[in-house]
Image (cartoon, helix red, strand yellow):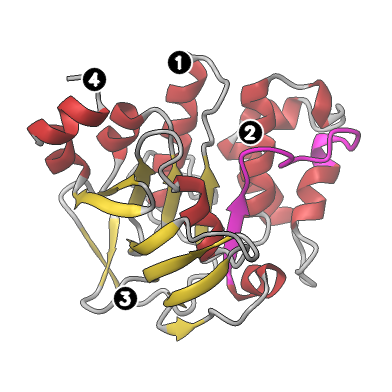
């Protein structure tokens, strides 16, 4: 047994890497993952309508939510508004309708920077590392909002992604695509977020690296931290998802558990290749 919440098997629910305050009482589901006590979703974008600047609406009454300890995934065809929905939750979109609530609090008027301070950890698809800085410097940059001792959190990130410890003095831009994604996720975890948001974390990586990243995401969720991600590998993402949202043209086309969506004939035929 160690002090690392990830080191003793996927069922470990030590939430020390997260800011558990406000996450609510947790129970366990059939997978052994932490679940919230009855109540509203921990993060929800409800009936979100909007687009970029003065342009046309991309999202149309779109609703996305994730509970504590859940993995929720957003899938759909290219141009469906998946990343746009994620950016709307993070405050990077002009909202013309709907609301965003974090831990029961309306945050629609907050800037992305203020949402980070309220507990949102966001990993964009591109430009998500500082390539000329070392791995360790990238992680230190992730802790910019903190004024406490970050060493324990950094040790947990290194335990989650051991290759980063080996390469901690190497420039992040010299790493492989999968390793750079680990740096990006690790940097978000350094904020001790209340919810982790990942925009296509497996884009451009090999199937083996994708499986490894998904394993790490499962481990993060099992600490009680909600994980919401946009993912292009829909079938694989739904296999690890507690909840899935299929978007088409900025609207909710299908919503359900990962298992139910994988079993849905229409979803399989239209979005999963049969």
Q: Earlier in the sequence, mark 2 or mark 1?
A: 2
Q: For the point 63% across and 46% down, which residue is it?
A: 124
Q: Secondary structure at mark 2?
A: helix
Label 1 residue SS: helix
Residue density around tag 1, few if under 14, some if 14–19, many if 20 or more, within 10 Å = few
Mark number, residue 207: 1
**Distance between the alpha carbons at the discs numbered 1 and 4:** 17 Å
Asked whether, in this view, residue 7 is left or right of residue 35, the answer is right
Sequence order check: which comes first, mark 4 or mark 2? 2
Q: Which residue is mark 4?
A: 273
Residue at the spot x=40%, y=83% of the render?
Answer: 104
Mark 2, Cα crowd under 10 Å, few <14 / some 14-19 / many 20+, is: many
Circle 3 Cα neighbour tier, 10 Å, few/some/many (<14 / 14–19 / ≥20): few
- For this view, does 54 lie left or right of residue 61? right
Nearer-the-camera pick, 273 or 261? 273
The answer to which of marks 1 and 3 sits earlier in the sequence is 3
Residue 253 in the image: x percent, y percent? 23, 49
Check if mark 3's residue and mark 2's residue have beta carbons within 8 Å.
no
Label 1 or label 3, whichever lies nearer to me, is 1
For discs 3 and 2, the disc positioned in front in the rendered view: 2
Distance Cα–Cα, label 3 vs label 4: 39 Å
Tell me the residue that label 3 is attached to.
Answer: 25
Distance in Å between CA atoms under marks 3 and 2: 31 Å
Instruction: Give the Cα separation between the discs numbered 4 and 2.
Output: 27 Å
Q: Which residue is mark 2?
A: 181
* Quarter assignment of residue 75: top left
């Amino acid at each position: 047994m160690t002090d690392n919440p990830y080191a003793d098997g996927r069922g470990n629910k030590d939430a020390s890497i997260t800011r558990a305050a406000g996450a609510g009482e947790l129970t366990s589901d059939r997978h052994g993952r932490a679940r919230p006590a009855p109540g509203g979703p921990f993060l929800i974008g409800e009936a979100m309508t909007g687009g970029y600047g003065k342009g046309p609406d991309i999202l149309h009454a779109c609703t996305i939510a994730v509970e504590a300890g859940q993995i929720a995934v957003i899938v759909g065809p290219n141009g469906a508004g998946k990343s746009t929905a994620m950016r709307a939750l993070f405050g990077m979109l002009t909202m013309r309708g709907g609301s965003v609530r974090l831990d029961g609090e309306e945050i629609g008027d907050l800037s992305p920077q203020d949402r980070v301070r309220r507990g949102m950890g966001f990993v964009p698809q591109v430009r998500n590392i500082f390539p000329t800085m070392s791995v360790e410097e990238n992680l230190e940059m992730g802790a910019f909002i903190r004024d406490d001792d970050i060493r324990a959190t950094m040790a947990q990130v290194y335990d989650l992604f051991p290759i980063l410890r080996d390469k901690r003095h190497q420039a992040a831009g010299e790493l492989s695509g999968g390793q750079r994604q680990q740096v990006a996720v690790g940097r978000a975890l350094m904020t001790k977020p209340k919810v982790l948001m990942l925009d296509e974390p497996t884009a451009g990586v090999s199937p083996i690296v994708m499986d490894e990243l998904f394993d790490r995401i499962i481990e993060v969720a099992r600490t009680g931290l909600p994980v919401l991600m946009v993912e292009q590998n829909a079938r694989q993402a739904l296999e690890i998802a507690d909840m899935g949202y299929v978007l088409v043209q900025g609207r909710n086309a299908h919503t359900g558990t990962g298992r139910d969506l994988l079993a849905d004939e229409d979803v399989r035929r239209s979005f999963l290749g049969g």
